[in-house]
Image (cartoon, rainbow, N blue to C red):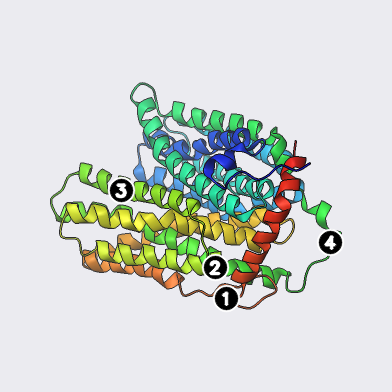
Amino acid sequence: MSTPLPRPSYAAVLRVPHARRTFAAALVGRLSYGTVSLALMLSLTRATGSYAVAGLVMALFGATGVFLSPCRASLVDRHGPRRALLPMALLYAVLLCVLAAVCRRPGTSEAVLAVTAAFAGACTPPLGPTMRAVWAQLLPDRALLQRAYSLDGVAEELLFVSGPLLVGGIVAVAPPLVGVVLSAVLVAVGTLAFVTSPATSAPRPTGREKKAGPAPGDGATGQARALLQPVVVAAAVGVSVSAVDLLVVAFAGEHGLGDGAVAWVLAALSVGSAVGGLVNGAVAWGSPTRARLPFFAAGVGLCLAAAGLAPGLGTLVPAVMCAGLFVAPALTTAYLIADESAAPGFRVRAGAWCNTAVNAGMSVGAAGVGLLVERLPLPVCFAVSGAVAAAAALVPGYRRGGSARRAGPISRRRSRASRRRRPSRASGRP
């Protein structure tokens, strides 16, 4: 006999069978992504004695990690998390250890470092997209899924803040190579715990779903149109947010502020994003996801443009924090739309496309704003960075097999239907 649903909340999300264990394991593995960049950069700098070489190797490591993400996600969709993730994670961990070993010897060939780093990045396991696919299987109720995605996004934000701090503590007492090895251990242990959780059997391989014929408009074109809005918005938010780092440094230099001021502003952005993510997950929205996404994207852009008008640190901090309030909701909503748009057997890939868009946008934003700062006044640079996110709000939303702007009401009807089915599915899960 089915039991009544608990009131939708963050606690209700974590009370779902196997949710706490699976989520904790995924976070352990994903902490590796928060520690590896700084640890590897410091190791490469010490080994080569060249910032240029270290930057090139890190660029290769990041590029293969970002742009091959959909390919790795497709392996998870086809073969399931247990068969695909663990080999990736173990190979990634081994290659990180190899990088740590070759960095121990000064004078190691730059080609060896570059090739090893490129292969390591290519094997990065897509733990984030897979965890979101698991959430979608565990929580067919859309209200609970919104809370789960918000919790996931906030936790990920905290990992990327705490990871560099952990590496900073390590390098105070040990070589940065220890941080690289720690990253390898974290991803291996976390992935092993993740794939052995009963919840990871939920996202089934594509082959098991081939009997169900595709619905009209569910082909490659329909899927691409449905993912256009969330992917473009995710990329644009990535561009705008990454631009903040250098813009704040330039602002501090222009106003005679120290590095401590930069840290405060960037911390305000992270705090705003965390608060916005938690509030977004807790609100019972009456509007559909595709209608909310442009609002969040425009909020990021307008607040960043306003931040460029700040006369000093006292006004820049709250302006950047206001921009942060829209960042996590924008990304969370993009992931929700990607999940709603995903065809059978495409869930991990759909999330991975959004993830790739964010990371690619951050890379482009960091490079682009560096050129702008040297040529344009700082308020104009803030405005241009904000305009990227605001322009993404104009991208129309499509559903699979439907026209623009029509996905919302249908999505809401599905949500109510899933809520009616939810008690039996919850009670039947071990």
Disc 3/disc 2 C-alpha distance (Å): 28 Å
Q: Give left or right: position of 306 versus 26.
A: left
Task: Please indicate, yes or no, whether residue 360 appears anywhere in the rendered image.
Answer: no
**Label 4 is placed on what type of residue?**
Ala
Q: Earlier in the sequence, mark 1 or mark 2?
A: 2
Q: Earlier in the sequence, mark 3 or mark 2?
A: 3
Q: Give left or right: position of 41 versus 423.
A: left
Q: Position of residue 132 (x, y in %)?
A: 60, 48
Mark 4 residue crowding within 10 angstroms, few (<14) / some (14–19) / many (20+): few
Residues at circles 1 and 3 in contact by the CB criterion of under 8 Å: no
Q: Position of residue 264 (x, y in %)?
A: 26, 45
Task: Please indicate, yes or no, whether residue 110 appears anywhere in the rendered image.
Answer: yes
**Label 2 is placed on what type of residue?**
Arg
Q: Give left or right: position of 20 versus 36.
A: right
Mark 2 residue crowding within 10 angstroms, few (<14) / some (14–19) / many (20+): many
Q: Residue at x 56, y 53 (%)?
A: 146
Residue labelled with disc 2: 290
Residues at circles 4 and 3 in contact by the CB criterion of under 8 Å: no
Out of 200 and 75, give the one closest to the viewer: 200
Disc 1/disc 4 C-alpha distance (Å): 27 Å
Residue 405, numbered label? 1
Q: Secondary structure at mark 4?
A: loop
Q: Position of residue 20 (x, y in %)?
A: 59, 35
**Label 1 is placed on what type of residue?**
Arg
Residue sticking out furthest to the left: 256
